[in-house]
Image: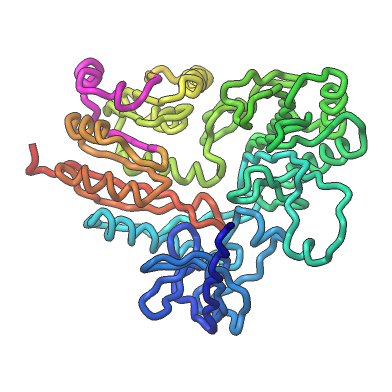
């Protein structure tokens, strides 16, 4: 017989005091820290605990006694259910203040880093419709909100096109309007959904049972006006596929790249799938400071184009290039930073794990008639070795932009062997960045720190750090 789960206590009239990692807020009850989402410092609430450990607990707000003056009215009807934009209830100036504080806390607390200068965070000019890429999932198991469940209504149609509910792989929240991408994205998604619902032969995908026809939809926009749409189907059905794609092309003539994928795998990733052109080009073009970047359906490109430009300008400024430097660009992706700084460098070598990304990097150099770049594909710790440096030359500057997990110890050891004059460390995770900075501190000092907000209404923050070699170290 299953044991009855013990009901965790309700904490009454608790004041929220601060914001924590992962976007949750903090309350302190006696000696226990309680993490609560979707609340603001200054809120006085009742908390229903959902998880309790020895020194901390997690819970949710079930009643508000007082609302904090530090509050904004969420603008999206999906706030609190959708997994994104969790900070809509905080005014933007408060969001960037907490992000700035998060960077300082991580560097000083985790890395024990001494900083000569930390610059004010660069906020985003636009806080809605700022993303250039979104991916939506078709599902025949729509997530019902608490309000919908309380009505007791029967829902004849459980089809949805939207985002996965966090922690629920087979449940999708039906999105009516998303504020993250240019509104053309909403219009395309709703038109595709309407067509599939009103025509036979378009069953929405069942993630648990692995059946259905229409699977996912990706939309990419560019500052140049280019527009890419990729529809993913579970199996080939030429008649129905072509009918839907033709309808999309006719309804939205502004689409410059209309593509499709037949993905019969269990997971939604298309990195190992053929992406086929139905109409238009197989890419879109992004532009930055006169440079053009080819972006394909599998390409990585920073999802906030406007703030990416600000981020790259900081990285270039910190690099202090005069035209005579050998630059290594680690985790170069499609070579965006490498090509962006190439005009101010003697030579730039980019290294990246994904072979397709390196091919894009080479194409982007050729597209812009850049001849002083070299790109290599492979695992960073295997490519960036002492032999590699001895062969290609010691870098004067290293720019590194690793994934959230930070850099492998072997990579850090090789950087310390290379001894560049300056290191520019771009990070999407200040916690792992702090750890790496601590390891580099045997030969380097942190001179400048510049946080950049790429993702308004989330807790995520990018951070750029300039390190300079200590003069008294060999």
- Residue 435 belongs to the span the image colors magenta: no
- Residue 391 belongs to the span the image colors magenta: yes
Q: Residue at x 30, y 27 (%)?
A: 381
Q: Residue furthest top?
A: 391
**Range drawn in magenta:** 377-402
Q: Between residues 151 and 96, which one lies in front from this camera angle?
A: 151
The quarter of the displayed image where residue 149 is located: bottom right
Tell me if I can see residue 375 in this picture.
no
Name the side, left or right, on which 208 lies relative to 357: right
Vertical arrangement, residue 102 with respect to residue 133, above or below: below
Q: Residue at x 43, y 59 (%)?
A: 21
Q: Between residues 318 and 462, which one lies in front from this camera angle?
A: 462
Residue 224 x/y as whole percent: 65, 34
Residue 357 x/y as whole percent: 49, 24
Q: Residue at x 41, y 17 (%)?
A: 371
The quarter of the displayed image where residue 372 is located: top left
Count the labels in the image: 0
Q: Between residues 381 and 124, which one lies in front from this camera angle?
A: 381
The N terminus sits in image quarter: bottom right
Q: Between residues 252 and 205, which one lies in front from this camera angle?
A: 205
Q: Residue at x 21, y 18 (%)?
A: 387
Vertical arrangement, residue 18 with respect to residue 395, above or below: below
Tell me if I can see residue 119 in this picture.
yes
Residue 369 x/y as whole percent: 48, 18
The C terminus sits in image quarter: top left
């Amino acid at each position: 017989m299953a044991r009855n789960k013990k009901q965790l206590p309700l904490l009454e009239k608790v004041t929220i005091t601060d914001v924590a990692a992962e976007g949750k807020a903090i309350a302190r009850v006696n000696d226990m820290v309680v993490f609560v989402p979707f609340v603001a410092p200054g809120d006085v609430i009742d908390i229903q605990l959902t998880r309790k450990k020895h020194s901390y607990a997690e819970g949710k707000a079930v009643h508000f006694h007082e609302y904090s003056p530090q509050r904004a009215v969420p603008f999206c009807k999906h706030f609190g259910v959708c997994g994104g934009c969790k900070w809509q209830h905080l005014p933007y100036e408060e969001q960037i203040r907490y992000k700035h504080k998060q960077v300082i806390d991580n560097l000083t607390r985790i890395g024990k880093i001494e900083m000569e200068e930390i610059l004010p965070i660069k906020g985003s000019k636009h806080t809605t419709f700022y993303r250039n890429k979104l991916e939506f999932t078709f599902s025949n198991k729509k997530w019902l909100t608490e309000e919908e469940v309380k009505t007791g209504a029967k829902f004849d149609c459980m089809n949805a096109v939207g985002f996965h509910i966090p922690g629920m792989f087979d449940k999708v929240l039906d999105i009516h309007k998303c504020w993250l991408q240019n509104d053309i994205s909403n219009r395309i998604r709703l038109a595709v959904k309407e067509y599939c619902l009103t025509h036979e032969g378009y069953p929405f995908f069942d993630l648990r049972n692995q059946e259905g026809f229409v699977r996912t939809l990706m939309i990419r926009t560019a500052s140049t006006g280019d527009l890419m749409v990729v529809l993913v189907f579970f199996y080939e059905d030429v008649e129905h596929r072509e009918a839907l794609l033709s309808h999309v092309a006719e309804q939205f003539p502004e689409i410059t790249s209309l593509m499709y994928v037949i993905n019969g795998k269990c997971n939604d990733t298309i990195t190992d799938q053929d992406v086929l052109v139905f109409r238009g080009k197989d890419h879109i073009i992004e532009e930055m400071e006169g440079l053009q970047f080819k972006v394909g359906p599998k390409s990585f490109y920073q999802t906030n184009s406007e703030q990416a430009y600000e981020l790259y300008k900081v990285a270039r400024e910190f690099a202090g290039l005069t035209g005579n430097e050998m630059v290594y660009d680690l985790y170069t992706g499609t070579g965006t930073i490498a090509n962006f700084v190439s005009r101010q460098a003697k030579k730039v070598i980019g290294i990246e794990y994904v072979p397709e990304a390196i091919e894009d990097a080479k194409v982007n150099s050729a597209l812009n008639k850049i001849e002083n770049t070299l790109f290599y594909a492979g695992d960073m710790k295997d490519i960036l070795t002492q032999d590699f440096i001895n062969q290609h030359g010691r870098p004067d500057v290293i720019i590194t932009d690793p994934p959230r997990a930070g850099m492998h110890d072997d990579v850090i050891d090789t950087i310390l062997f290379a001894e560049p004059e300056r290191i520019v460390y771009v990070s999407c995770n200040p916690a792992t960045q702090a750890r790496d900075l601590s390891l580099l501190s045997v030969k380097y000092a942190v001179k400048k720190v510049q946080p950049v907000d790429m993702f308004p209404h989330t807790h995520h923050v990018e951070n750029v750090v300039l390190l300079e070699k200590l003069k008294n170290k060999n």
